[in-house]
Image (cartoon, rainbow, N blue to C red):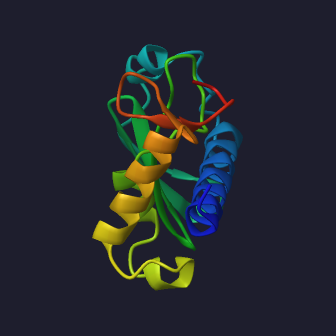
């Protein structure tokens, strides 16, 4: 696995985990599936502990952390460790250079190479997982 991409994925999934923790602290339970999330009836927008705002969408949520916005989808079985290149790029917006990428195109090429190499596994719907994870 490309070290730059591995660090970006680790930072992204750590932020997702933190965001889900805030949702839970705010009384929004973690779903057992992405469809349960989509149909849970919580307000589309709200404020979580610490004044952190969220925006619920489809199978996921955008949480506006102090460190930046993290946008994620729950996996088919409620997993929170899935990602795609669009979400990684959005998460690293303005900071791609800090991860060693010169452009979104370079990140996308690296991501595709890791899919071909088998380090990233496609879920069948949008998300990818690290090989051996929740796929």
Please tell me which residue is depicted at 71% across the width and 42% down the height of the picture. 25
Q: Nearer the viewer, residue 92 or 42?
A: 92
Mark count: 0
Q: Quadrant of residue 129?
A: top right
Foreground: 54 or 94?
Answer: 94
**Residue 29 lies in quadrant:** top right
Q: Position of residue 101 (x, y in %)?
A: 44, 77
Q: Position of residue 91 (x, y in %)?
A: 45, 64
The residue under the point 39% across, 65% down is 107
91, above or below 27, in the image: below
Outermost residue on the front side: it is: 117
Q: Position of residue 112 (x, y in %)?
A: 38, 50
Q: Is residue 39 above or below residue 121?
A: above
- The image shows residue 26, relative to residue 101, as above or below, that is above
Q: Is residue 66 visible in this depiction of the protein?
A: yes
Residue 71 lies left or right of residue 48; in this view the side is left
Left or right: residue 90 compared with residue 72? left
For the question of whether residue 95 can be seen, the reply is: no
- Closer to the camera in the image, 21 or 82: 82
Q: Quadrant of residue 124?
A: top left
Name the residue rendered at 32%, 70% in the picture: 104
Whole-percent x, y for residue 1 in the image: 62, 55
Q: Quadrant of the C terminus?
A: top right
Query: Which of these two is toward me, 130 or 1?
Result: 1
Q: Residue at x 45, y 42 (%)?
A: 115
């Amino acid at each position: 696995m490309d070290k730059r991409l591995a660090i970006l994925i680790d930072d992204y999934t750590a932020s997702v985990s933190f965001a889900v923790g805030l949702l839970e602290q705010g009384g929004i339970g973690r779903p057992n599936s992405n469809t349960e999330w989509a149909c849970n009836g919580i307000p589309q927008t709200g404020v979580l502990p610490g004044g952190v705002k969220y925006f619920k969408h489809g199978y996921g949520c955008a949480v506006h952390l102090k460190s930046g916005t993290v946008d994620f989808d729950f996996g088919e079985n409620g997993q929170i460790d899935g990602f795609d290149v669009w979400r990684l790029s959005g998460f690293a917006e303005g900071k791609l250079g800090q991860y060693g990428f010169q452009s979104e195109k370079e990140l996308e090429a690296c991501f595709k190479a890791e899919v071909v190499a088998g380090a990233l596994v496609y879920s069948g719907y949008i998300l990818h997982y690290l090989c051996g994870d929740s796929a």
